[in-house]
Image (cartoon, rainbow, N blue to C red):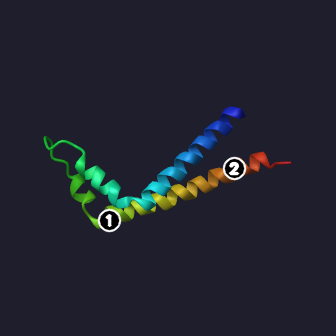
Amino acid sequence: MTRLMVVLICSEIYFVVVGVVCLIWPYEIQVFSLSHGGPVFYNPFKSWVRTQYYIWSLRSIGILSIACGAVVANFILRYFFAD
């Protein structure tokens, strides 16, 4: 049961960090993803990354990630405060 709790705590931290990063810095993530990658190959994904839909996708990923972190935190709290 200890391994399960370690996995739950690590996944909860991961979900919350990804959610916070996607909600606070979506434009920096966009700049980072556009600046990386070589010009050798044509990447049609980069044309989508330049759009505003990408920013909204990052924000929705952030909201969903924080929601998943809250669900995992609920499981952790139920385990620790169970009768």
- Please state which of residues 21 and 43 is positioned toward the viewer in this rendering: 21
Label 2 amino acid? Answer: Phe
For this view, does 56 lie left or right of residue 12? left
According to the image, label 1 marks what residue? 53
According to the image, label 2 marks what residue? 75
The percent coordinates of residue 9 (x first, y second) are: 63, 43
The percent coordinates of residue 15 (x first, y second) are: 53, 50
Label 2 element class: helix
Label 1 element class: helix
Q: Residue at x 37, y 65 (%)?
A: 56
Label 1 amino acid? Answer: Tyr
Crowd band around label 1 with a 10 angstrom C-alpha radius: few (<14), some (14–19), many (20+)? few
Q: CA distance from mark 2 to mark 1?
A: 33 Å
Q: Residue at x 50, y 61 (%)?
A: 63
> Is 71 drawn above or below residue 9 in the view shown?
below
Q: Residue at x 26, y 64 (%)?
A: 51
Q: Earlier in the sequence, mark 2 or mark 1?
A: 1
Q: Quadrant of the N terminus?
A: top right
> Is 81 drawn above or below residue 26 in the view shown?
above
Crowd band around label 2 with a 10 angstrom C-alpha radius: few (<14), some (14–19), many (20+)? some
